[in-house]
Image: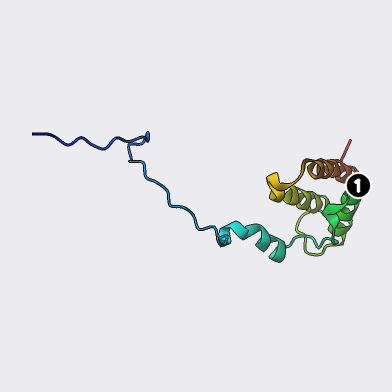
Amino acid sequence: MTTRRPPVSSREDGRSATRRRARDTTAPSAAQRWSQRVTEHSDALDLEPGTFSHDDPDEVAQALKRAAERSTRRKGTPYQSAMSMLNFYINRAGAHLPQDRRDTLERAKQKLREAFGRGS
């Protein structure tokens, strides 16, 4: 007579390991499109076209400063709004942002601090 052994579990919590189903890659879910929704419907700044495509960090900073000071929808200070928009763009692009663009935008952060009298 043989006895059944319990299934071997590879997980620390004792639950059996199961395979995950392949995800449908045809369309992103609403949760994955949150940044588009934020960009379209939030109290974000109204930016000039091509703001983030300037090669000069000072031009990027000045464009963000103009937009932040002109905005009537922002809830924070112009500095907070401009810096938040720059960080949002950098973070949203993630690994898809080429290193030279990332470097330019990181330098634009310092230029933005200086433009608002916050940098040293």
User: Residue 103 location, x and y as percent?
Assistant: 81, 40
Spot the residue most to the left.
Answer: 1
Residue 47, given in percent of the width and then of the height, sits at: 83, 60
Establish if 85 lies above or below 27: above
Up the image or down, 89 lies above or below 1; here it is: below
Amino acid beneath label 1? Asp
- In the foreground, 54 or 88: 54
Given residues 93 and 40, the one toward you in this image is 93
Q: Is residue 32 above or below residue 101?
A: below
- Image coordinates for residue 75, horizontal then vertical, percent: 75, 58
Left or right of 98? Residue 13 is left
Residue at left offset 88%, top offset 55%: 63
Quarter where residue 101 is shown: top right
User: 10 Å neighbourhood of mark 1: few (<14), some, or many (≥20)?
Assistant: few
* Colouring used for the render: rainbow
* Quadrant in which the C terminus appears: top right
Q: Which residue is mark 1?
A: 56
Tell me where residue 29 appears, x and y as whole percent.
Answer: 55, 60
Q: Secondary structure at mark 1?
A: loop
Image quarter of residue 13: top left
Q: Residue at x 78, y 50 (%)?
A: 86
From the viewer's perspective, tell me whether residue 118 is left or right of residue 16. right
